[in-house]
Amino acid sequence: MPPKTALVVYNPKRRVTIYKIRHYKTKRDIYVGQTCNQVKRRAAYRASVKKELGKNAQVHNLIVAYVHRCQDKGVAVDLEPLDKFPDGVPADRSDAFEALMIHDLGTASACGKGGKNTSCGNNLGIHEPLFERYRKEIEDSGDVYVWSDADVAMRDAVASEVVVAQAQLAALQAVQEMVHEASDKPTPNLDEQVKWALVDLDDAVRKFMGPLLLAEALADKYEAQLDVLAVDAAEFKVDLNALRDKLNEQPVPDEDLLGLCRAVELMAKREVTAGFVAHQFRALAQAIQVIEEAKLPECTGVKIAKEIRQVLATTKQDWLQSPKHRNALPQEKGCYHRLATWKEAVSKKHDDDLPSHVAAMRFILRSNPASAQRFGAYFLLDKRAKADATTKQINAMLLDGYAHPNEPEFEGRKQWPAHGLDGSDAARLYKSLKCFYNKSQEYTQARRDAYLEGLKAKWPEREVWWWNMPGLAFQRKAGTQPVESDED
């Protein structure tokens, strides 16, 4: 478990901030939200809000109406990221923890406490039965959420000061966007809060990020602006000087990189556009990465990682395709087998310990966050632990009354939640339930017992029905034994 003071971030696009808003007068928590400042709200949602306003000529969104009231009174929106999630949460856990905090803080309007959440969160039917497990997970790690070992091992280190500033800005921007999309009424106080949050983030980035991450962050900053607009010359100079200072802080400053900084400064003697500045910082970031990459150890793992990068650049995929895939290239098949052989050798030699060269391989693939994530999962994902977690989730839902679609009626029966989009937590659970029902003969006895644990005591007739599911009936008829399988 990482130290609580050494916060790290794998990829900001996967980190979601869970925040709350306090009432300006009573200081009671009235709203819980989630946001990732790299993700925009859906156009359909914005269109529906505009349509509603056009019909009724008034704001029905409770939190939007509250923010307007704050503006009328000249007070700031009292907003803060929740301290239980100092490093944010992975995108696939955000719905779970948002629903939990809405429940625990009582911010839903239905609670009758003046809350402004119009719903109790996304996929509540899935998450509500697991609230106790979520609470225990947070309590066991010191009352804060800690990312999994797999995420921690493969993430880029980012100072806690930067994480805090990013979270504050993301939360404020989420509320600002929500209000601006729902109404044309000005919000000067909220806009001022966002402006100063941007300043705080810029200061934290310049002060605490290393040279490579700083150069990439500055490139992202100017790429977010309109290409043809002139940049603030003074701000550009501050950013360039911050990068130069970071390069000079290195044990052996690279003269070539410092020379590039001087060249960029000379080119900026005239008025320059945001597109020009973004290009310069992106070029500096790429130069820094090439120099850092040259320092990596010469080993089989690094050679394979470079080969993977080359193959992915050709296929335009996030990861290597199986050799059985009809579109797999010959060089892709060879790379796939070499990686699998290398991983097997590493696993036998190091057991559960991560070899140091894997970090170097991660660095090779860092330019594509999706590929880096797939690489991390390939080496670090504990399939047995994941299967155990899925088994516990489904068992808890069965005990809560959620039933397989084919189950006969019983007292307390609940319809299994809609599985939603592919890749979602709901879809994964639904697929696992179907797999267990149809292919139960492929599961070990211990795994089957874990799925149905406690069912006999609560619903004996359901337990009988489950033990007569197709997979087990076929197995009894054939007289076969289950194979070892820990994958759901």
Image (cartoon, rainbow, N blue to C red):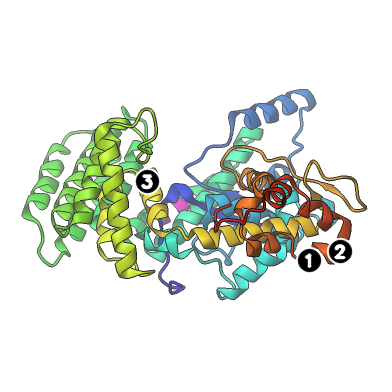
For label 1, the crowd category at 10 Å Cα-Cα, with few meaning under 14, some 14 to 19 and many 20 or more, is some
* Badge 2 amino acid: Lys
**Residue 198 magenta:** yes
Residue of label 1: 454
Q: Is residue 55 left or right of residue 382?
A: right
Q: Looking at this view, is 348 or 136 the one in front?
A: 348
Q: Looking at this view, is 149 or 116 the one in front?
A: 149
Q: CA distance from mark 2 to mark 1?
A: 7 Å
Is 407 rendered above or below residue 325? below
Is 454 rendered above or below residue 233? below
Q: Is residue 50 left or right of residue 88?
A: right
For discs 3 and 2, the disc positioned in front in the rendered view: 2
For label 2, the crowd category at 10 Å Cα-Cα, with few meaning under 14, some 14 to 19 and many 20 or more, is few
For discs 1 and 3, the disc positioned in front in the rendered view: 1
Q: Mark 2 and mark 1 in contact? Answer it, CB < 8 Å.
A: yes
Q: Give the residue at x 69% y 42%.
A: 64
Residue of label 3: 369
Q: Mark 3 and mark 2 in contact? Answer it, CB < 8 Å.
A: no
Q: Earlier in the sequence, mark 1 or mark 3?
A: 3
Q: Of helix, strand and loop, which one carries label 3?
A: helix
Q: Looking at this view, is 404 or 440 the one in front?
A: 440
Residue of label 2: 458
For label 3, the crowd category at 10 Å Cα-Cα, with few meaning under 14, some 14 to 19 and many 20 or more, is some
Residue 26 rendering spot, x and y as whole percentages = 75, 63
* Badge 1 amino acid: Gly
Q: Which residues are magenta?
A: 196-200
Q: Give the residue at x 59% y 29%.
A: 43
Q: Of helix, strand and loop, which one carries label 1?
A: loop
